[in-house]
Image (cartoon, rainbow, N blue to C red):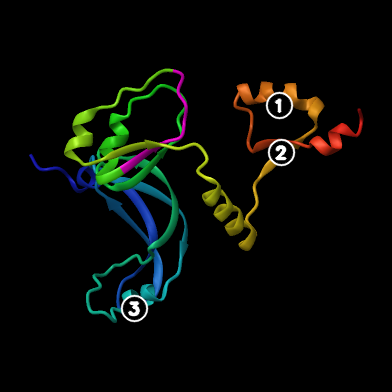
Amino acid sequence: MSKSPEEEHPQKAFGYAARDSSGTLSPFQFSRRENGEEDVTLKILYCGVCHSDLHTLKNEWGFTRYPVVPGHEIVGVATKVGNKSAIGTMDYIIDTVSAVHPLLPLLSLLKVNGKLVTVGLPNKPLELPIFPLVLGRKLVGGSDIGGMKETQEMIDFCAKHNISADIELIRMDEINTAMDRLAKSDVRYRFVIDVANSLSKY
């Protein structure tokens, strides 16, 4: 028994669409099929307007199918992610997890010749599956902060482009409270101790 249109396309969506080559946009409700295991659904929060959208709206390239909802410069939040949506798509992964965790799911995300770099420090050894490394020619490495050359390049880049860090400045006598908050994950920015001004009271 065949599925109804509602069953085939259960996800409701909304946009502004052009119905013809006049390019006039108006509200448009439509339905999308349910996610497959290789799909990602996004809730779009912002969308840039590109000149290519204008070409598409007016069918100036000859391949527009109406109705059309233009827009490809999007910022959004993933609301549904298929189980296989990212498998084999990544060149590099930086693993910052400091708890014991399996590496196989991360390795499966890498392309052939992909690299997994661990910077977290779990308190127990991690199991390293060999088959995906060998068959996929994948590499696993580690790093802490890089060398002096890389550090200087980073500082120079930040200075040139006026990039600064978001921090929460604390006095030395607030360090125990800061440590308690750190243990509770109650930290939004990096704690930085104002040593110079703290010492003035001693």
**Residue 54 visible from this viewpoint:** yes
The answer to whether marks 1 and 3 mark residues whose Cβ atoms lie closer than 8 Å is: no
Q: Badge 3: few (under 14), some or many (20 or more) residues near its Cα, within 10 Å?
A: some
The vertical placement of 181 against 67, above or below, is: above
Structural distance between the alpha carbons of marks 2 and 1: 10 Å
Q: Residue at x 35, y 22 (%)?
A: 126
Q: Which residue is mark 3?
A: 55
The residue wearing badge 1 is 178
Quadrant location of the C terminus? Answer: top right
- Tag in front: 1 or 3: 1
Whole-number angstrom distance, CA of label 3 to CA of label 2: 48 Å
Determine crowd level at label 2: few under 14, some 14-19, many 20+ residues with C-alpha closer than 10 A.
Answer: some
Residue 182 position in % (x across, y down) = 63, 26
Q: Which residue is mark 2?
A: 168
Q: Nearer the viewer, mark 3 or mark 2?
A: 2
Q: Residue most toward the left? A: 1
Toward the front, the furthest residue is: 148
Amino acid on which the number 2 mark rests in the picture: Glu
* Bounds of the magenta segment: 115-123
Q: Secondary structure at mark 1?
A: helix
Helix, strand or loop for disc 3:
helix
To which quarter of the image does residue 80 belong?
Answer: top left
Q: Where's residue 51, x and y in %?
A: 41, 76
Mark 1 surroundings: few (<14), some (14-19) or many (≥20) residues within 10 A: many
Where does the image place residue 109, in percent across and percent down from the top left? 28, 40
Residue at left 38%, top 20%? 125
Query: Does the magenta run of residues contain 191?
Result: no
Counting the numbered discs, the total is 3
The quadrant of the picture occupied by the N terminus is top left
